[in-house]
Image: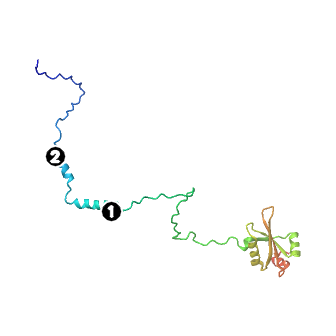
Amino acid sequence: WLKERSPAPRAAAPRTGRAPVRRSESMAPKKKAAAAAAAAEEPADGEKPQAAKKASKAAKAVKKSVTRKVKKVRTNVHFFRPKTKITPKNPKYPKKSTVGRERMDKYRIIQCPVTTESAMKKIEEINTLVFLVDIRATKLNIKEAVKQLYDVKCAKVNTLIRPDGRKKAYVHLTQDYDALDVANRIGII
C-alpha cells in the first residue's frame, strides 16, 4: 500500500496550431548580477571629481536663501497691454515722387463776379463787391484771393450758400478803396 503513486495523467490541450510555451525553470545566475551592482556602486577614477562638484553645488544651494517668485499684486480691475518698443519710421525712398501742388489757388477760389441789380446797389452804396466762389473756400481764402487779384484790402467777408448749391461772397472793402473803381477795372460796369 505504500507503493509510489505515478502522477495523474494530464488532459490533452486542444490544438490551436501554435507551439506550447515552455517556461524556463532555471533562474538567472545571481553571481553576475551581484558583480554588476557592485561595479555600479563603486565610481570610476574619472567620476570622483564630478561627484565632488555635485556635492559642493548642493552645499552652496543649501547655504543660499531660497528666492521664490513674488506674485504681482493687482490693485486695478483693468488690464493694459505692456508698452513695447516703437521704432521710428526710416523710409528708404519718398512715398511721393513730387510735391503736391495747391489745388485751391486764387483763380479757383473766385469764380466770377455777380452782376445783378442788387449786387450793383451794394457796390454803389455800401462799398461791397459780390462774387461767386468755390464751395470749399473759407472767408480767409476769399480775403487773400481778392487781395492778390485786385490789389484791394478787405474789411470783412460774408458768405452764404445759395439754394442752387453755389457759394456767394460779399466782400466789404476798407474806406481807402472804392468798390466802384474796382468794378470798373474788372469790367462789371
49 w.r.t. 109: above or below:
above
Image quadrant where residue 158 sits: bottom right
The residue positioned 80% from the left and 66% from the top of the image is: 160
Number of labelled discs? 2
Q: Nearer the viewer, residue 64 or 102?
A: 64
Horizontally, residue 98 falls left or right of residue 35, namely right
Q: What amino acid does circle 1 point to?
A: Lys
In the rendering, at what x and y percent does residue 85 appear?
A: 51, 66
Q: Earlier in the sequence, mark 2 or mark 1?
A: 2
Nearest to viewer (mark 2 / mark 1): 1
The residue wearing badge 1 is: 60
In the rendering, at what x and y percent does residue 50 appear?
A: 25, 60
The residue positioned 28% from the left and 60% from the top of the image is: 55
Residue 32, numbered label? 2
In the rendering, at what x and y percent does residue 112 appear?
A: 78, 71
Quadrant (top left, top right, bottom left, bottom right) of the C terminus:
bottom right
Residue 8, numbered label? none
Horizontally, residue 152 falls left or right of residue 34, namely right
Horizontally, residue 156 falls left or right of residue 19, namely right
- Mark 1, Cα crowd under 10 Å, few <14 / some 14-19 / many 20+, is few
Q: Distance between the Cα atoms at labels 2 and 1?
A: 40 Å
Q: Secondary structure at mark 2?
A: helix
Q: What amino acid does circle 2 point to?
A: Lys
